[in-house]
Amino acid sequence: MPMCASCSWTGLWDAARMPFLPRTSAEDAINQPARKQFEVFLDEHRDALNRCLDGLTEEHARRSLVPSRTTLLGLVKHAIFVEKVWFDEAITCRSRAEIGIPATPDESFVLHDDDTIATVQQAHREACEASRRAASPLELDDMVHGNRRGPLPLRWVYLHMLRELAQHCGHADILREQLVNK
């Protein structure tokens, strides 16, 4: 399923790239329960963001095209942070220090010498898998208590993650288009 009508790089969602993800597409989930629909949409966006790095050089993945810290590699690294904030911190109530993630979202874009396409993609796959495991025993209306906003239903977390991932997939699409069409 293409990410959006103008996306040239996402192609079909490839569950084989992320074997821990279900092989159901959004089209197949139309008549499924809301929980299944949320999970399928999340997984499609997770996969699309992870794949934005496919076929790029390390230099391209790190290239800054905007004044902020945003790079394609940084976007996927930030997505790891987001997964851990919403599915580890929010659900388990562990602190960011305990989890081993930056204190702020902006810091999550910082790239280190050992951040490569392969290591960041693998860490992202692992974070997504951990998120699915953390949420699996919960129902959509169950409350999570580890967010600074206070108690939130898992349904809100799923909706927030969909919004966040959709925005970042759009950012990635624009950045990738600039890199591969130069």
Image (cartoon, helix red, strand yellow):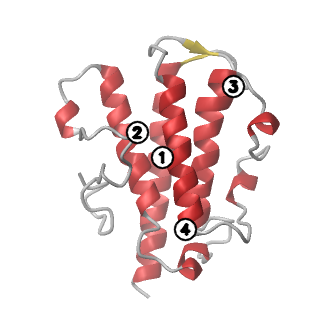
Point out the frontmost of discs 2 and 1. Answer: 2
Name the residue beneath numbered marker 4: 117
Q: Name the residue rendered at 77%, 47% in the picture.
A: 102
The earlier-in-sequence mark between 2 and 1 is 2
Q: Amino acid at mark 1?
A: Leu
C-alpha separation, residue under disc 4 versus residue under disc 2: 21 Å
Name the residue beneath numbered marker 2: 42
Dot 2 crowding, Cα within 10 Å, few <14, some 14–19, many 20+: many
Helix, strand or loop at label 1? It is helix
The earlier-in-sequence mark between 4 and 3 is 4
User: Residue 18 versus residue 75: which sits nearer the camera?
Assistant: 18
Name the residue beneath numbered marker 3: 147
Q: Quadrant of the C terminus?
A: bottom left
Name the residue beneath numbered marker 1: 165
The earlier-in-sequence mark between 4 and 2 is 2
User: Residue 18 versus residue 30: which sits nearer the camera?
Assistant: 18
Point out the frontmost of discs 1 and 4. Answer: 4
Query: Are circles 1 and 3 on residues that touch, CB within 8 Å?
Result: no
Query: Are circles 4 and 2 on residues that touch, CB within 8 Å?
Result: no
Dot 1 crowding, Cα within 10 Å, few <14, some 14–19, many 20+: many
C-alpha separation, residue under disc 3 versus residue under disc 2: 20 Å
Question: Where is residue 22 drawn, in percent x and y?
Answer: 31, 37
Helix, strand or loop at label 2? It is helix
Query: Are circles 2 and 1 on residues that touch, CB within 8 Å?
Result: yes
Residue 93 position (above or below residue 63): above
- Horizontally, residue 144 falls left or right of residue 30, namely right
Question: Where is residue 73 drawn, in percent x and y?
Answer: 58, 65
Helix, strand or loop at label 3? It is loop
Point out the frontmost of discs 4 and 3. Answer: 4
Q: Amino acid at mark 4?
A: Ile
